Image: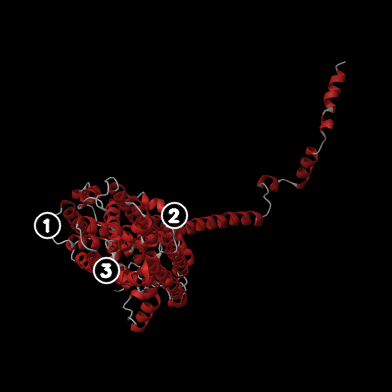
């Protein structure tokens, strides 16, 4: 691309200042396409170093997060038999993790920005280790709830810290791929919480399993502290602050079109896989424990596989003109169809609908990607935290709500009747259908929008060679820079006018001071004696001029 730079801007745009000309001659390098994205060769050694020191340590924390999240589906029967828990007690115990998990989602973004993901995640994993040890030593329901609450607090930052770390250290063109692998590795924790955990429970019991998880959490925290580098210093033009607040995100209409569907479908998938899949397979399908464990294993594998499938196909379909919102709606519809098959007891293999339900738990790959297109990159952390809070709230509400509804039926032969589970799941399904209809509803003025002129963001994104969502901060920065330049130009013009006026005034004053005293030409032509007489006459006192008047008055008498 040919560009002409005036000599006046040469020094300002020289490489020593780290700037270069924008394609339109007005955008400095700090506001244009980043230097590192311009045909920079990929260093394989650096890639593997990032995998070993960033991706894997944070993936280990996310892995443990998924183990803690889904393990109750495996040990629910053991807890019920040992502590005499009801369905409502079991739902509250399992959901308490999501309650403390969600309570720190909003401040978590500020912690990650201020202290960095390394310190925050290591500290939280130590809290998770303490919670796992307390859960293993619990003697009653209150002790279980306390341990579970600490676990929820400890794993609250597993996903957010990993995503933040990948943004800080991964190349910009590899962040999406790195996010997919992070989620895929993390969801393997759900696989571990099935058959492998069942084998461990047979040898050490559920208390021994949680003591082992406590040790592994402490080791994961140590690995992050030792191997993960400190967060890089901010480069020129970068800032951790953003003018967009959480309140602004929650007031955005586009956010509330996506959030209800994402929260109900993904939250329900987490709730069903994390707790109610086991009781459903045991009480409704009447499967033996071995088959229940195998079903949970298949669901966990499906969750991990769908994390890569949704990300890969979503990206490919988007390149062919299919938006991510359509892919999310299709995945959600598939999960709702699977739940409908469970409620109506369709004659299909039992594992088939549970695979679709578990796969929807990886729908965060699509939800967070859609969210990145709605908000600028500087606000992505806050936006992700705002949506993730609703995911967790949806999982909490689904786990507790299903437990409360199921508990309305009396226990028959040491189990709840199938109608109790069908009713609870049917109510939850109705809510998800409502959110799907809200998501796919037609947009007003959709026909007239096609006649509107193209937004300049598209031309800028094409010129820079980056996605439209990534070009939003550059467009905002360029507009701000141009506005400030216009203000500076107006100020310079005003100062030039002031300087010109000052020069004119000072010139006039100087000319007046340099001129000789002014003398009238008529006075200059009179004889000197007359001028002197005139001056003497003008100097006569007023009292002297009044004397002839008194004399005249005296003579009349």
Residue 517 point in image, percent of width and height: 69, 52
Q: Kindly report which numbered mark, 1 or 2, lies closer to the viewer in this rendering.
A: 2
Give the mark, 1 or 2, whose residue is nearer the N terminus. Answer: 2
Q: Quadrant of residue 523?
A: top right
Q: Name the element at disc 2.
A: helix
Q: Name above or below for residue 338 compared with residue 466.
A: above
Between 211 and 412, the residue placed more toward the observer is 412
Determine which residue is flagged by label 2: 142
Determine which residue is flagged by label 3: 304
Residue 91 point in image, percent of width and height: 34, 53
Categorize mark 3 by other alpha carbons within 10 Å: few (<14), some (14-19), many (20+): many
Between 322 and 307, the residue placed more toward the observer is 307
Residue 534 point in image, percent of width and height: 77, 40
Q: In which quadrant is the C terminus drawn? A: top right
Determine which residue is flagged by label 1: 347
Residue 37 point in image, percent of width and height: 34, 74
């Amino acid at each position: 691309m040919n560009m002409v730079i005036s000599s006046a801007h040469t020094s300002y745009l020289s490489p020593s200042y780290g700037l270069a000309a924008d394609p339109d001659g007005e955008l400095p390098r700090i506001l244009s396409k980043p230097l590192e994205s311009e045909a920079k060769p990929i260093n394989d050694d650096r890639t593997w170093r990032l995998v070993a020191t960033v991706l894997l340590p944070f993936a280990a924390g996310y892995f443990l997060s998924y183990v803690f999240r889904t393990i109750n589906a495996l040990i629910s029967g053991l807890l019920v038999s040992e502590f005499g828990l009801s369905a409502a007690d079991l739902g509250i115990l399992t959901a308490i993790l999501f309650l403390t998990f969600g309570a720190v989602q909003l401040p978590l973004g500020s912690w990650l920005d201020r202290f960095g993901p390394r310190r925050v995640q290591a500290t939280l994993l130590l809290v998770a280790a303490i919670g796992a040890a307390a859960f293993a030593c619990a003697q009653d329901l209150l002790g279980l709830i306390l341990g579970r609450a600490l676990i929820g607090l400890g794993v609250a930052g597993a996903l957010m810290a990993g995503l933040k770390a990948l943004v800080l250290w991964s190349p910009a063109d590899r962040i999406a791929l790195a996010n997919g692998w992070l989620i895929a590795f993390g969801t393997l924790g759900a696989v571990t919480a099935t058959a492998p955990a069942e084998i461990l429970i047979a040898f050490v019991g559920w208390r021994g399993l949680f003591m082992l998880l406590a040790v592994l959490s402490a080791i994961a925290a140590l690995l992050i502290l030792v191997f993960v580098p400190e967060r890089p210093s901010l480069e020129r033009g970068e800032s951790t602050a953003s003018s967009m607040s959480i309140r602004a995100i929650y007031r955005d209409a586009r956010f509330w079109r996506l959030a209800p569907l994402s929260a109900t479908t993904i939250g329900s998938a987490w709730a069903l896989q994390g707790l109610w899949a086991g009781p459903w397979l045991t009480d409704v399908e009447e499967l033996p424990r071995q088959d229940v464990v195998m079903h949970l294993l298949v669901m966990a594998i499906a969750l991990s596989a769908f994390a890569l499938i949704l990300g890969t196909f979503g990206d490919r379909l988007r390149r062919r003109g299919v938006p991510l919102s359509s892919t999310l709606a299709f995945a959600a519809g598939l999960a709702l169809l699977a739940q409908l098959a469970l409620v109506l007891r369709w004659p299909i293999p039992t594992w088939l609908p549970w695979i679709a339900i578990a796969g929807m738990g990886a729908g965060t790959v699509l939800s967070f990607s859609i969210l990145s297109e709605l908000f600028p990159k500087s606000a992505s952390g806050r936006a992700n935290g705002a949506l993730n809070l609703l995911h967790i709230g949806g999982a909490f509400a689904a786990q507790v709500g299903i437990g409360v509804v199921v508990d309305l039926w009396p226990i028959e032969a040491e189990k709840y009747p199938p109608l109790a589970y069908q009713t609870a799941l049917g109510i939850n399904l109705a809510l998800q259908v409502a959110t799907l209809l809200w998501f796919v509803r037609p947009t007003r003025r959709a026909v007239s929008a096609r006649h509107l002129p193209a937004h300049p963001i598209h031309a800028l994104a094409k010129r820079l060679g980056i996605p439209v969502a990534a070009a939003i901060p550059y467009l905002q920065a360029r507009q701000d820079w141009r506005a400030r330049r216009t203000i500076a130009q107006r100020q310079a013009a005003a100062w030039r006018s002031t300087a010109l006026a000052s020069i004119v005034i000072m010139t006039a004053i100087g000319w007046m001071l340099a001129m000789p005293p002014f003398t009238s030409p008529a006075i200059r032509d009179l004889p000197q004696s007359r001028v002197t007489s005139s001056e003497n006459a003008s100097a006569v006192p007023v009292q002297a001029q009044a004397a002839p008047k008194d004399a005249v008055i005296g003579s009349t008498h």
